[in-house]
Image (spheres, rainbow, N blue to C red):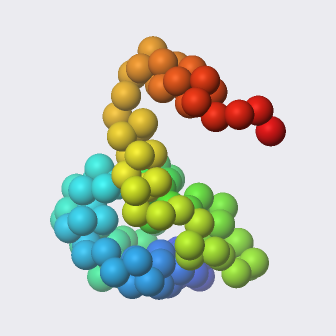
Amino acid sequence: MNQTVKYIHRNLLALRDHHHISDSTWARLAEVNRSDLSRFTNGHVCNPKFDFLEKICAALGVTLYEVMSKVPMSTDAYSASERALVMRLRRMSDSQRDVVERMAEALTPDD
């Protein structure tokens, strides 16, 4: 495992622990295979795929950029309900997301 992957690995495990999320819950939220996540968390994946990292980051409410950044991350970026909403949105079709976006725009005042 190279230094960059070790850094990402360490930060993701710290976030997982901060949010008190089990690996099985994390895998379900990220929509990844539980055994793939287990291999990653146990340090057995030397070169994780980009889309895998994006999914497991999103499940924790952060971006891969935030995880890789030297700037301290806000571990309270998203609540559990906000993360769940993002995961629901990811499973929707483009037309369904458009409807949700229009509804959100109608329900929230302009900034």
Q: Position of residue 86 (x, y in %)?
A: 45, 46
Which of 20/46 is in front?
20
Residue at 42% across, 36% down:
89
Q: Is residue 39 left or right of residue 83?
A: left
> Above or below — where is 8 with respect to 54?
below
Q: Quadrant of residue 75?
A: bottom right
Which of 73/3 is in front?
73
Visible residue check, residue 72: yes
Q: Position of residue 31 (x, y in %)?
A: 29, 50
> Above or below — where is 36 with respect to 6?
above
Which of 69/101 is in front?
101
Q: Quadrant of residue 39?
A: bottom left
Q: Is residue 83 left or right of residue 64?
A: left
Residue at 65% across, 76% down:
73
Q: Is residue 68 left or right of residue 87?
A: right
Visible residue check, residue 52: no
Where does the C terminus fall, quadrant-wise?
top right
Q: Position of residue 57 (x, y in %)?
A: 48, 61
Residue at 20% across, 67% down:
24
Residue at 24% across, 56% down:
28
- Residue located farthest toward the right when viewing the structure as drawn: 111
Count of number-bearing discs: 0
